[in-house]
Amino acid sequence: MKVTVHRKAHFNAAHRLFRKEWTDEENLEIFGKCSNPNFHGHNYELVVSVTGEIDEKTGFVMDLKVLKNLIYEEVEQAFDHKNLNVEVPEFSNLNPTAENIAVIIWNKLKPKIKSEHELEVTLYETPRNFVSYKGA
């Protein structure tokens, strides 16, 4: 029997959506106000979901305290109150869209999760705009 456990987290970060090889006008046309050269910020809400069999001994799919600590160490410390374009190495050459942020978070967490467990990352950029990633 497979069960999914979820852990919510939160971080605040600034970013700018743009392509270096495009003009400011081209970036504005595609990314709108999100291409502001002075950056803008979001209060991101993150839901990390782990699916797997219930361990007979513990009754857990995964200890949520362990998941909480992983999210803190791998995501919150790396992203919270940061300028993603400037301070997070993964985005030095990658546009920090919600889609790309979710993939980066998944890539940071997946190696720390048991291989038999499925991982899904859902990232809310705003209360109405969110993305999910389950791996390739």
Image: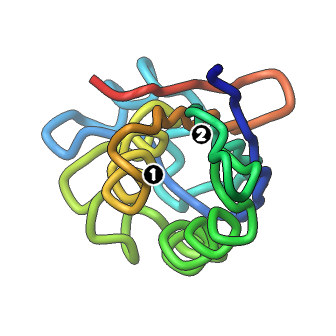
What x and y, as percent, mark residue 53? 58, 33
92 relative to 76, above or below: above
The residue at the point 70 percent across, 27 percent down is: 3
Instruction: Quadrant for residue 9, please give it.
Output: bottom right
Q: Secondary structure at mark 1?
A: helix
User: Which quadrant of the figure contains the N terminus?
Assistant: top right
Q: Quadrant of residue 13?
A: bottom right
Quadrant where the image shows the C terminus: top left
Mark whose residue sits in front, 1 or 2: 2
Q: Which residue is mark 2?
A: 50
Who is closer to the viewer here, 110 or 36? 110
Closest to the observer: 37 or 97?
Answer: 97
Nearer-the-camera pick, 117 or 43: 117
| Residue assigned mark 1 | 105
Residue 22 position by quadrant: top left
Outermost residue to the left:
21
Residue depicted at x 75% and y 42%: 6
For the point 71% across and 64% down, the residue is 11
